[in-house]
Amino acid sequence: MDVRNTTIRNRTLHSLTFVNDQYRLQIHFKYNEAYENAINKSILFINRQSAQELSFPLHQIEEIDEFRRLEAVIPLAEYAEQLAEGGVWDAYIVLEVEQTDEETEEEETTLGEDDPAEDDEAENETDLDEADASEDDERGPVIKRYRLKSNEPYLELLYYTNPAIENVIIPYTTNKGNVSIKAREPGVIAKIEAMSLSKSGKLSLTGYVIHTDVTSTEENRKKTLVLKHKDGDEYRFEARTVKRNDLTERYGKKGRNYDSAGFEVEVELGPFGSVPEDRSLKLWMELQDNDVIEGEVPLASPLKWIRHKGNPGQSTILKSKNGKKKFSLKARKKSRNVSLRIAEYSLKRELISRAKKLGGKVKRHKLTKAAYLLVFKFVGFLPAKKNLIMFESFAGKQYSDNPRAIYEYLCENHPEYKMVWSFNRKTYESRGDDSIPCVRRFSIRWLFLMARARYWVVNSRLPLWIPKPAHTIYLQTWHGTPLKRLAADMDEVHMPGTNTKKYKRNFIREARRWDYLISPNAYSTEIFKRAFQFEKEMIESGYPRNDFLHLENNPESVRKLKESLCVPLDKKIILYAPTWRDDQFYGKGRYKFDLDLDLNLLREKLGDDYVLILRMHYLVAENFDLAPFEGFAYDFSSHKDIRELYLIADLLITDYSSVFFDYANLKRPMIFYVYDIETYRDKLRGFYFDFEQYAPGPLVKTTPEVIRSIREIEANDFKPSEILDEFYDKFCYLETGHSSQKVVERVFLNK
């Protein structure tokens, strides 16, 4: 089994051979001074999330003009378990170079984003290109790293299986044309090599489809193209098998061939013109035995565009009884999943769409970004607008939290300030309250406001590329009392698009820009100083957002809130507000959440007396279908501020979210639904105190246990326990309804 390129390019994979449970990897490297002075040469695989490294020696085997051909052997059997558990590993050529007198400074690290070929979700790749990491001795060796490149789109056919591990190890070429290794469960790989959409409306696709758990011929497997709509509709078309001896010759080995892996399929799109509404159809390929067993679930995978460069977007316009329809075929930029879009056609709509695309390209161009940053820096040298305050909550997603409380206090008591909210595009376009002065994040107007503002009031990190002007006072409010370990206190980081070292470094760089940091209590102050390495002024005031819980906690306010939210007045309310999981994500900044509560059972046992409100963490990208639970379960994840949900809730169910520190101000019952506590405590984050001993409520792991705890609370006519009182005295003692005033007097009035 062998992948081999005849074209010689610098730092590029020449061949990858798979034999005897080993990858034999050969690369081309252009001779330079670093190579000449290299003490050691190696191939290094770096895990995207944990930053764990695996290194294998490189040896020169041939000279070709100015190029050197190097070879490394990767014993897969020995490292299979480690690779299979580690997710994505990126490959680098590493030279350990003897440092000269001139080489005493570290070079810049260039960061980029990329995506695995086999992932439906976007993942991010750290693109270290000639990034040096100096040794402790500043006159010692320098490590030079170069990303290993590839022009080979078929690397995944060299996948490795081992009976001792559950996952399959798959090499692939990333969207940027680099080499990485991905571990995933056995399954279908389906790729489109050519596709066309004719003017007459004929969709033609050719490609290959394999299953990584099958090591013999797949002649008996039927191939079916499936066009899927999100509402469940499916359109199925049988594909013809095409002989692919070429794949077997290049990538096959004993016991594995791809002779029957090819497919071709044609679809007449004319009948789709009768579809009345616009819709997007995802393309999938199914594999199923010809002798179908009743109830057998077909093996399936989204169809992906095989190339790592270019977008094969195509479109055509067809007439139908419902008017003109535009059919657009395209591959997503990151995942490369292929979809077919059907929409009504109008010239006006087409011109607007093209104008938006052109504008988007201009905005994303590197020269535009560089110019934007340059203008920001220039405007930042202009005199500050001393009464201008910029507010932002959760990266512009909400009008909420501590910034909202400070804003509302200032509006009522200090109207002399000009205050503007920074909203992201989605929030800005969907805002309903025009009385809130706001600006779209990263717009031209936003640039001038941010660069001239005297104050920034923010509750989460700002992007590091935003330069903080010398005249700006940056008030970081933060957004929770820490139970889970933060920043520098974290042992490992499992978030997408970063690794432990990079995450901590960037976090601390951002924290150094803060002039003030709000702390809700002495416990948090100690942690914030250490975890954020914060050395400026800490305002230990309690959280401004919790003023509302003290000032509005009365029957009349609760009734009005229930009426405005359209929830029953005659039933008790359970608020379910869990946190996110670092290692469950679709991509950078987009996290998954599996609703493990059994809503059917909850409704059956509690529905006569209770309703359930769901409030997901702002990082969770789920939309739960609660239609089957209408009248019992409500999704308020998009509600602008959780503080109103606290006030109407008779009981809180949470897990490790900091919401329970805030809810404790009300001294109402809490239940901790911690079905994965061992993983969360020991692997993902770790806790600052013995959560299992000191949590101000019962810890449960199943829905029946949740129900039993609720019934026990009812039977005992809930009164705050000694544990809850002690918890309140430690974490909520500063919050009396005046935290906003304390912060404003210190930061804005300099008292």
Image: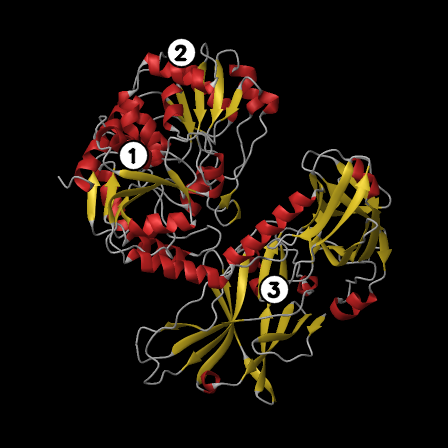
- Report the disc number at residue 407: 1
Q: How is the image coloured?
A: secondary structure
Q: Position of residue 544 (x, y in %)?
A: 27, 32
Q: Secondary structure at mark 1?
A: helix
Q: Is residue 239 left or right of residue 116?
A: right
Disc 1 from disc 2: Cα separation: 42 Å
Q: Is residue 668 left or right of residue 260?
A: left
Seen from the viewer's position, the closer of residues 30 and 318 is: 318
Q: List the residue tagged with mark 2.
A: 715
Q: Is residue 210 left or right of residue 573?
A: right
Q: Residue 554, located in which quarter of the rendered image?
A: top left
Q: Residue at x 63, y 73 (%)?
A: 24
Neighbor class of circle 1 (other Cα within 10 Å; few <14, some 14-19, many 20+) is: many
Q: List the residue tagged with mark 3.
A: 77
Disc 3 from disc 1: Cα separation: 60 Å
- Report the disc number at residue 537: none
Neighbor class of circle 3 (other Cα within 10 Å; few <14, some 14-19, many 20+) is: some
Seen from the viewer's position, the closer of residues 674 and 525 is: 525
**Circle nearer the N terminus (3, 1):** 3
